[in-house]
């Protein structure tokens, strides 16, 4: 996949709370090295991680009161990445009339996240994608960040892949060959939606609490190009949880994933955070393990897959991402809808 062809999207680089006034964060998106800090106006600055003086690494400099100082010769950068002082030339006066700027990128801050778009301004989409997650008094939520040594596509697909859950998350979700599940899989432009029918037993050790009668669960997964997935479960007793993941391509085989988990467990909601967070991280750790291993095999032997009927979600998702990565329009893809049966 050519990552260089995916820059015209917003990618989350940090939670807003991480980028404090005196912090500098090193990040990488689409192979580009980035240094992030806040200017004196509080606005996030995302610059190429390269001092324009003599290529010091800006992210190893120090941030203070809205400025970033390069640790090599002390050039000081301010709001918007502008150079505001060169110590060897006498400080601020030397640069007052000169227009020296780090290379910076378009930034947006939204819903507690800092986003960057690497495309030139004119091509930046107006706003970051609004995450489809619930809000309201009944809901509580938390965020997780994780790092995978695998590519964007395989990470996205893992989050909406049901057959692996019986193996990788054995006991947490379900055991192998427990149930036949009917699904409707549809694709429209850059959106893949998977609706599950007749699913009853995928709640593992908490089934007795969450779905004691073993009745049908509502389950829908979505993929929104190029990098967002959401998984939504609604249980017969009205309990509900919603998992949204933003997978950010760091490099060809590295992906940073920001996950938002929202839940409504009725009267248990106020007490569920600790256990919900622990269970969620446990499941993601199992995914990191399998995806890192898959990534190592792909690095050695290349990405060659055998496709079965049950892999239809992967096929439809991969077509979208490879269409984008080839620089073509997603509108060239045909809309489709299929009924698929999984045995898991
Ligand atoms: S390289 Fe950054 S100040 Fe010289
Ligand atoms: Fe998983």
Image: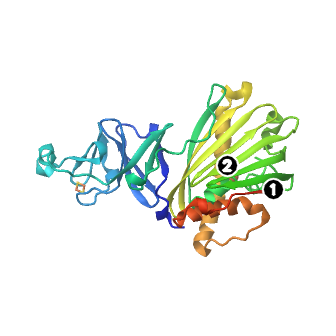
Quadrant of the frame with the C terminus: bottom right
Report if the CB atoms under discs 1 and 2 are less than 8 Å apart: no
Asked which secondary structure carries label 1, the reply is strand
Q: Residue at x 46, y 45 (%)?
A: 126
Q: Is residue 200 left or right of residue 276?
A: right
Per the image, the residue denoted by label 1 is: 339
Which residue is at the front of the view, 322 or 344? 322
Q: Sequence order check: which comes first, mark 1 or mark 2?
A: 2
Model colouring: rainbow
Which of pointers 1 and 2 indicates the residue nearer the eye? 1
Q: Is residue 331 left or right of residue 310?
A: left
Quadrant of the frame with the N terminus: bottom right
Q: Looking at the image, can residue 293 be seen?
A: no
Q: Residue at x 73, y 24 (%)?
A: 267
Residue 222 is marked as: 2
Asked which secondary structure carries label 2, the reply is strand
In percent of width and height, residue 8 lies at 47, 55
In percent of width and height, residue 116 lies at 44, 49
Q: Is residue 154 left or right of residue 218?
A: left
């Amino acid at each position: 996949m050519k990552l260089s062809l995916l820059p015209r999207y917003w990618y989350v680089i940090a939670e807003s709370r991480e980028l404090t006034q005196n912090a500098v964060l090193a990040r990488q998106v689409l192979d580009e090295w980035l240094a992030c800090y806040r200017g004196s106006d509080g606005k996030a600055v995302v610059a190429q991680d390269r001092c324009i003086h003599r290529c010091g690494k800006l992210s190893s400099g120090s941030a203070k009161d809205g400025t970033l100082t390069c640790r090599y010769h002390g050039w000081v950068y301010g709001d918007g990445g502008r150079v505001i002082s060169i110590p060897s030339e006498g400080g601020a006066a030397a640069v007052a009339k000169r227009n020296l700027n780090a290379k910076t990128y378009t930034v947006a801050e939204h819903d507690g996240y800092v986003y960057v778009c690497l495309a030139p301004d004119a091509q930046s989409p107006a706003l970051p994608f609004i995450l489809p997650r619930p809000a309201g008094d009944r809901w509580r939520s938390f965020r997780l960040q994780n790092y995978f040594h695998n590519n964007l596509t395989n990470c996205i697909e893992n989050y909406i892949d049901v057959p692996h859950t019986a193996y990788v998350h054995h006991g947490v979700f379900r055991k192998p060959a427990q149930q036949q599940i009917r699904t409707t899989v549809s694709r429209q432009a850059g959106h893949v939606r998977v609706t599950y029918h007749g699913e009853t037993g995928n709640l593992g050790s908490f089934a007795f609490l969450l779905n004691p009668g073993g009745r049908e669960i509502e389950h829908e997964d979505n993929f929104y190009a190029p990098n967002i997935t959401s998984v939504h479960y609604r249980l017969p007793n009205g309990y509900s949880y919603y998992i949204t993941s933003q997978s950010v391509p760091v490099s060809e085989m590295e992906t940073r994933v920001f996950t938002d988990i929202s839940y409504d467990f009725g009267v248990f909601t106020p007490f569920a955070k600790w256990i919900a967070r622990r269970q969620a991280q446990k499941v993601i750790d199992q995914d990191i393990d399998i995806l890192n291993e898959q990534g190592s095999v792909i690095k050695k032997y290349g990405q060659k897959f055998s496709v079965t009927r049950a892999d239809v979600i992967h096929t439809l998702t991969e077509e979208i991402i490879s269409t984008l990565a080839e620089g073509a329009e997603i509108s060239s893809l045909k809309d489709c809808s299929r009924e698929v049966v999984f045995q898991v």
